[in-house]
Each structure stands twice: as structure tokens, then as C-alpha cells.
Image (cartoon, helix red, strand yellow):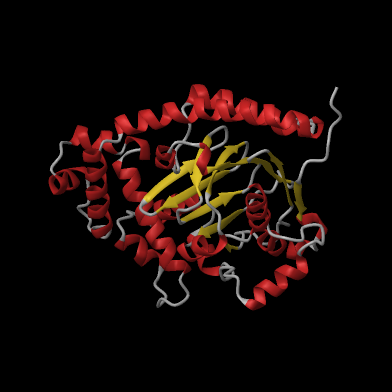
Amino acid sequence: MDSPSVLDTYRFSTLDAPPAERFDAWVATSGSWSFVAPDERTVPFDCRFDATRVGPFTMGRRTWLNPDRNVAYGMTRTARQIRADGLDHYYLLLHLGGSITWQFGKRTVDMRPGGLYLIDTVHAFDCIVRTGDTVIVTLPRDLFHPDTAKLHGCAMAPAMGGILADYLLAFHDNLSGVSAAQVPYLTQATTNLLHACVQPCADTLMQAGTEIDAALRERARSYIEQHLTDPDLCPDAICKAIGVSRPKLYRLFQPDGGVMKLVQRTRLLRIRNMLADPTRPRSRIADLAWRYGFASDKHFSRSFKAEFGHSPRETIEQPPRHRGDAASASLAAAARPALADATFSDWIVKGNRRAA
């Protein structure tokens, strides 16, 4: 019987930092993202992360240690960061609690507990994270068909996705008993299951997402973006602008929760970006809500908080975005526990170079 061996593991906990500096400690270990501080700074950012290298994969888990007091914070990955950090793989995310609302260009994706989603690190994004537990698997790009990249931001199909989710949880929970001799067999089994889960989704995506439909969606999104302040922005106007019937329009945007749901999300995101931009002249929240088609302040505030996890006024009052400047980097480094002597991104890239 093989005896367990110590696999290459990355561990980090914010509990080693003073309560007021725990979010900065978290930022310091992340490396490849910019952050917006939590909406509720009185709640300590109590979080733990571990990741283990298993063959070409890494199996990680983010655990929120303050489940009775959740917070929301922002994350951004920019084109400059993509060029600089060398990350070139997929993340497979299994949400066990909390949620993430992603903005991929003009596309919004809500990730909820129980969902299994694929994220491509070579694409920029903006997201709002509501704290909870997440299993994170890093997948080498070269192990998968090039069409897998089309699944960026997509949920895995429920049947195979459910099987894979159960497998990933069991895999993570039993890593401590895995020996080096067992790693090649686990790698092959994991690769086979991932291919079985991902490939049918890619086939379905290629069949359903024809080039014509993709072009129509993009035309509709462009029209919506250009008419966000138009009080007559409605399905009929969009249909007329892009030349489709109402049933066709509804089918095109069914994955987004409907075309008017997309309109509302796009308007909310535009307002949030305006409120969060300290360089813009300050506008009254009520004026912005009216300008972007919300019938009442109450409806706007309720919709805004449901989308982003905090109120419009709290967006204005939030601390500045962590941009990696010298001052914030110095503070973050001071808050970083000695155990995590590199960012998670550095650890991933270092492992990739060793494997090359």
C-alpha cells in the first residue's frame, strides 16, 4: 500500500493578520486582479485558501470563515494584467455558497451555489463576489480541445456537471491521503471525466450558438448600450432595430434571463461605474435613476442592491479600488503572513514552468 506523500501545496489564511488588515492581506496574495474593498468594512475578512498540485491540475478551495456575516467585494482583471502575469489556463469554479456576478465585456453571468462554471484567464472581466465557499480547479489549456475556450463564463450541463461536482468535492476532501504513485492514475481519471463533461457542452454550444445568432445578439447588445437612457427602449424597439421577431429576440437572450433583464443589468452597471468613478462630476442618485429609466428611487435602490450587494450610496462611499500602487502594495505586504511567500498566481506560474 502506498504511503501518502506531501504534495506541493499553497496555503493562506487571513486570520494571521490583524482584523482591520485582513482584506489587504487577501489582496496581497492574489496577484493577478485588482480589488474593490468590501461594502461592509466592519466585518473582518476572515478567509482561508488552500491549493494542491496534482499532476497538471491544481485543486483549491476558498473557505469563508465568517458565514453569519457575509460581505461583497469587487474584482477586476485587466488586459495589462493578462499580458504581465503569464496565466494561460482555465478555472473550473464550483460554488458551494455565496455568488459571483461576472461582467465579460457586455455579457453578464450570475454564478449561484451548486453551479459549475468555466473561466478563461486570458479574458478581462469585472465581477462582484458575495463571500462563500468555492472549489477552484486550474486546468491546463493544452489538455483540452481549442473549442473549450468558447465555454468561457458558461455553466456545465446539469447532468454531467453534477457528476463532476461530486467528484471534485470528494477529490479535494481526500487529497491528504494521496500518494505520489497514485497521482498519474488520478490525473488520467480526472482528465477523462473533465473531457466527458466539457466536450458535450462545447458541441451543444456550437450547435446552438450559430454565427448568425451570435451576430444578432451582438447587434442587440450594441443597440441597448447606445439607448440606455431612451425611455422607449423595449423589446419592440430592439426587434425593429435588428430585424427579428419578438419570439426570436426572447430565444436569443433566454440565457441572460430575458432581454429586459439584460437591459436592467446594463443600466445598473453603467450607473454603478459612474457612481464609483471619483473623476466624474457628482450627480444626484435620483437623477441618474430617472435618466436610466427607473420609475422610482425605491425600485432603483432595491434593484441596485440585489445586483451588487450594496446600496448606491455605499458605492460612492466605498474606499478607492486597490490598484497595486506602491502605498497599497507596501501595506498589503506588511499584512501578508510569512507562510504565503508568493502570490497564488506566482505559485501557479512557477509550477507551470517546472512542468514545461
Quadrant in the rendering for residue 177:
top right
Residue at position x 40%, y 38% in the image: 147
Q: Indicate the quadrant where residue 227 lies.
A: bottom left
Vertical relation: 203 (above or below) 141: above
Residue 160 falls left or right of residue 150: right
**In front here: 18 or 140?**
140
Report whether residue 142 is seen. Answer: yes
Horizontal side of 52 relative to 3 (left or right) equals left
Residue at screen point 45% across, 71% down: 277
- Is residue 278 positioned above or below 302 on the image? below
Figure quadrant of residue 175? top right
Q: Position of residue 67 (x, y in %)?
A: 71, 43
Instruction: Using the image, determine if residue 213 lies above or below residue 184.
Output: below
Q: Residue at x 50, y 40 (%)?
A: 118
Q: Position of residue 116 (x, y in %)?
A: 54, 34
* Picture mark count: 0
Q: Is residue 56 left or right of residue 264?
A: right
Which residue ends up furthest to the front in the rendered image? Answer: 356
- Report the front residue among 286 and 200: 200
Residue 79 location in percent, x, y?
46, 62
Instruction: Answer whether residue 33 is visible to the viewer in this image.
Output: no
Judging depth in this view, the residue of 131 and 94 nearest the camera is 94
Q: Quadrant of the N terminus?
A: top right
Residue at image point 65% right, 31% down:
187
